[in-house]
Amino acid sequence: MKSILLIILAVWLSSFIPVKNKLVYSVPAKKFYKWDEFNMGVDLSYVNQIEDYGGVYRDSGQVSDCFKILKDHGANTVRVRLWHTPAWVGKLNTGKLYYDLYGVEKTIRRAKQAGLAVNLDIHYSDTWADPHKQETPAAWKGLALDVLKDSVYNYTLSVLNYYNSKNLVPEMVQVGNENNGGMCWPVGKIVNDDFSNYAVLLKSGIKAVRDFSKTSTIKPRVIIHEAQLQTAGWWMNGITKEGVTDYDIIGLSHYTKWSSVKTMQGVTDTIQQLINTYKKTVMIVETGYPWTTENGDQYNNIFSARDSAPGYNISPDDQYRYLKDLTQAIINGGGKGIQYWEPAWITSKLNDGWGTGSSWDNVTLFDFNGNALKGADYMCYPYKF
C-alpha cells in the first residue's frame, strides 16, 4: 500500500513545476501555427473605433497593441468587415466611416505590420449583412440583375486594386457575409429554394477576385460564407446546383446560442461531411463563447447566463476549455481554421447605433479592464492533427 501511495504522489507532483520554492501548475507548451497551416483568426473590425473612444488593451496588466497581444497568444490572421458606404456610421462619429474602403485600410495595415494575414470580409452592403438582412448598397438600389452583377464585379475588383496600390492585398477574401438568404436583396434573395439570382452575383464577385489574382503576387483565397452548421448542407447544395464551384474555402459561423448542432462530435461530423461532399477546405470564420455572465456597462449583452453550451459553464476557464475543444473538433473533422468574432469589442464610449459600450464585452478575449484572458491561449494550444 505504501509503495502505491508513493507512486500516486510522484505522478501528482509531476504535474507541478517548482518556481522559486513554490509549486505552480504546468501549462502546455505553446505552439504557433502558420495562417495557411491552420488558421487562427480574430475579427478586429471594431478596434480602431474602440481605441478612438477610450478603449485600452493590456496583457498581464501592461498596456500594449491589441494586434500584438493577440498575435502573442497565437493569432495568425485578422478578419475585417468592409461596408460599401456606411454613411450612418459617419453620422455617429463626426464623419468617420471606419468600415469603408479607407477605414478598413487602417485595419489591414495594422495587421500586416504585425505580421498577420488578412481575411477581407466584403458584406456588399452599407450595413450589417447576415441571414436576416442583406441590404443592397444605396449606390446600387433598383438595379436589374445584369447591371447589379457588373456592380458587384467592378466594386470587388476596384477594392482589391486599391489595396494592391497600398501593398495591402488580403490573403483571403470573403465574397459575402452569412449569405444564408443570398445577397443584395431583393434581387439576389433566395426565395423558395431558388438560388439562381444569388448565384449570378456570387459568381461575379468570385470572378473579380480571380481576375485580380492573375496579375497579383498575393492571390487571395476565396471564401464563401454561410451561418450555422445545421443549414450548411442545404445552402451548399443550392449554390452547387447553380454552378458555384470556383472557390477555395467553405466558411461557416458557429455559435451554440443559435445552433442546433450542440455537441463537439456534431461539429466534427458536419465539417467532415462537407469536405467529403464538396472536396473543399472548411473553416469556422465566426464563433464566440462567453467568459462571464456579468456586464461591463449599461449596453445589454447578447449572450446571457442561459447561453452556455452543453457540458460547459460560463467562466474564464470554461471559455478556454470550450474554445480548445471546439478547435480540436474542427481539426478532427478535417477543418483548417477558426476565426473568433470581435474578441476585442471591449466596453468604451463607442456608440454603435444600438447602445454605448459593448453588447459583446462578456464574449471577448479580454476582461472588463482590457486584460487578455486565458481564453485567448486556445490559439496556441498544441493540438492533435
Image (cartoon, rainbow, N blue to C red):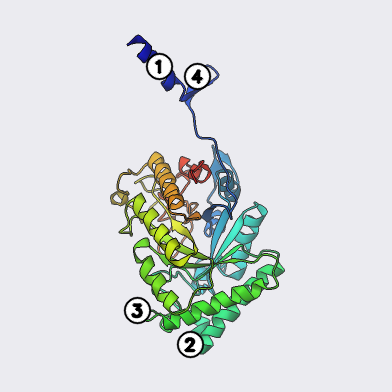
| Mark in the foreground, 2 or 4 | 2
Could you tell which of marks 3 and 2 lies nearer the N-terminus? Answer: 2
Q: Is residue 345 left or right of residue 98?
A: left
Q: Of the residues shown, which amino acid type is indicated by label 2?
A: Leu
Q: Which residue is at a point 30% across and 44% down the rendered structure image?
A: 311
Q: Of the residues shown, which amino acid type is indicated by label 1?
A: Ile
Give coordinates of residue 346: x percent, y percent: 47, 51
> Given contact means CB atoms under 8 Å apart, are the residues at marks 3 and 2 in contact?
no
Q: Residues within 10 Å of mark 4 (few under 14, many from 20)?
A: few
Distance from Cα at disc 1 to Cα at disc 3: 64 Å
Q: Nearer the viewer, residue 302 or 328?
A: 328
Could you tell which of marks 2 and 1 lies nearer the N-terminus? Answer: 1
**Which residue is labeled 2 in the image?**
145
| Mark in the foreground, 4 or 1 | 1
Which image quarter: residue 222?
bottom right
> Given contact means CB atoms under 8 Å apart, are the residues at marks 2 and 1 in contact?
no
| Mark in the foreground, 4 or 3 | 3
| Location of residue 336 with respect to 247 vertically, above or below | above
**Which residue is labeled 1 in the image?**
7
| Location of residue 65 with respect to 146 vertically, above or below | above
Distance from Cα at disc 3 to Cα at disc 2: 18 Å
**Which residue is labeled 4 in the image?**
22
Could you tell which of marks 2 and 4 lies nearer the N-terminus? Answer: 4
